[in-house]
Image: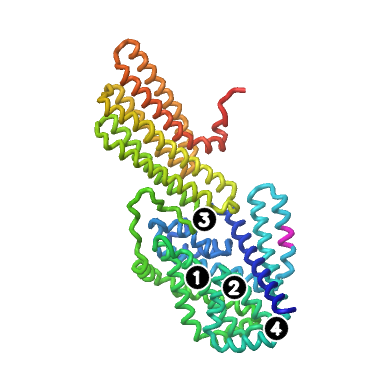
Amino acid sequence: MSATSVLIHLLGEIALLLWGINMVNSGVQRAFGSDLRWILGVGLRTRLRAFLAGVGVTTVLQSSTATALMVASFTAGGAVDLVPALAVMLGANVGTTLIVQVLSFDISLIFPVLIFGGFIAFRRGTSSRARDLGRVTIGLGLMLLSLHLLSETIRPIESSVALKSLLAAIAPDTLILVLLAAAFAWAAHSSVAAMLFIMSLASAGVIDAHAALAMVLGANLGSALNPLLEGTGGDPVKRRVPAGNLAIRVVGCVVALPLLDPMLKYMTMFDPNPSRLAANFHTLFNVVLAAIFILPLPWIAKLLLQFFPEKLRASDPSVPQYLDTDALDTPSVALSNAAREVLRMADTVETMLRGSQDLFHEDDISRVDVVSRTDDVVDHLYSAIRRYLSSINHEALSDAEAKRLSDILAFAINLEHVGDIIDKNLMELASKRIKNHLRLPKDSLADINSMHAKLLEHLQLAASVLMFQDIGSARKLVAEKERFRDLERAITQRNLEQLRSGNTMGDTSALQLDIVRDLKRIEAHIAATGHSLLEESGDLKPSRLTS
């Protein structure tokens, strides 16, 4: 086999390995995304529990990067301390070694069964979770298949004089081996892929045991580079956890490098198989790092806080604060970010509603412009949220996450409509009242105040429905819409009766009716937040029309 042919085979087999890892990652996130977030949420309370949560979640996902993104959703804004976040990364590093341990054994006969079984589950599964687990099983089979093909490709070049001469020239310089392995792990974006490649080289005899251990150190170093390099932009807070993880691994590599020979001597006594030797050292390295550094994490966190101080928030309220683009490939995290940004949007709409209420009492025309400019903030946030949601990896969405995305987007659309009604309708009416020196009667002002108060209460209730998916709150929200409609009818009827009796002026009467009409439109948009949840539970029919 020519060198070109070997290179082509290696590239294809490595790509197959990475694709298998991607299938496992996306399949697990589709099937258990919300549950994994819950596990991390519960685990991020103490260092030990955070470490165990990191081990468990990363073992399932086979990606410490995905785990880090989930941790970021809890640490953003200071909701979770940096210390347990670093503990999660120590656990994530150990978690990645467990799958390597499994793959270090000769289990090549299993991949046909996994691929076939996964295919049956994917095609015949009666639920979305069963199909997602089929996808995971196929991914595991492809990983084993790629490992088998890698070993078959490398075996014929074991006797290559040129390769042996090259490796013989490099082998004495351990640092070069570390850097080469680090570069490969960084390029592959996976320590699992790098480890499997190193194990294949060791198993085929292309590299000796000492070189394999050195390359294991490099693989650990390179896999820690990706989160840091990909998070170089934006808030420095995002770099604290990856920088701390990289620093711990650098220290570990510096200490372990001169101790490779004595460690190799004792580890060979335990298991001399080259492939198993590399896997065992990979596990030992990360377990020892976790044991050593889990206690001094508070001091490490203090140093990270000094090196990566929190960036001052932008003074422009229309600039999104939670739409982290690094989380787009992890839907559960991205949806959480989008929901938090929509709550900011709701707070801005609440400010507009309060300003609208005041302007039917006061005569300060300049405040009309202030409220109108606030609508620009709402529009900018809506556009940013819509773009962010459209950029989420939709292939990795579970059915529940797809519905969650739809609900978040629907709430953002309704908030944007509310902002437009306040800006283009209520502010026009307020401006007309002030310019024409109109005074609404006390009973009319009381009605408008009552409707505004209800809208503010309902807006808070709608935000609660979106975040907690509480059916009781959704029922109350929709029921309040009916009562709001009754209130609007009563006000309109009373206004008409006063107009017929000549007890009210035509201009103020028309003004009040227009205000009430627009407030009712706002209520309809707010109440729509509860429709999706109630339709899903069967508490609300899609249509009220009788057959």
Instruction: Report, in whole angstroms, how far the alpha carbon at label 3 lies from the one at label 2.
Output: 25 Å
Instruction: Between residue 122 and residue 154, name the one nearer to us.
Output: 154
Residue under numbered circle 1: 224
Q: Quadrant of the C terminus?
A: top right
Type of the residue with mark 4: Glu
User: Bounds of the magenta span?
Assistant: 113-117
The answer to whether 226 is drawn above or below residue 38 in the figure is below
Instruction: Report, in whole angstroms, how far the alpha carbon at label 4 lies from the one at label 2.
Output: 19 Å
Type of the residue with mark 1: Ala
Q: Are marks 4 and 1 in contact (CB under 8 Å)?
A: no
Q: Which mark is residue 194?
A: 2
Type of the residue with mark 2: Ala
Q: Which mark is residue 158?
A: 4
Residue under numbered circle 3: 328
Instruction: Report, in whole angstroms, how far the alpha carbon at label 4 lies from the one at label 1.
Output: 30 Å
Q: Position of residue 129 (x, y in %)?
A: 63, 51
| Mark 1 / mark 2, whichever is N-terminal | 2
Q: Main secondary structure of the magenta part?
A: helix
| Mark 4 / mark 3, whichever is N-terminal | 4
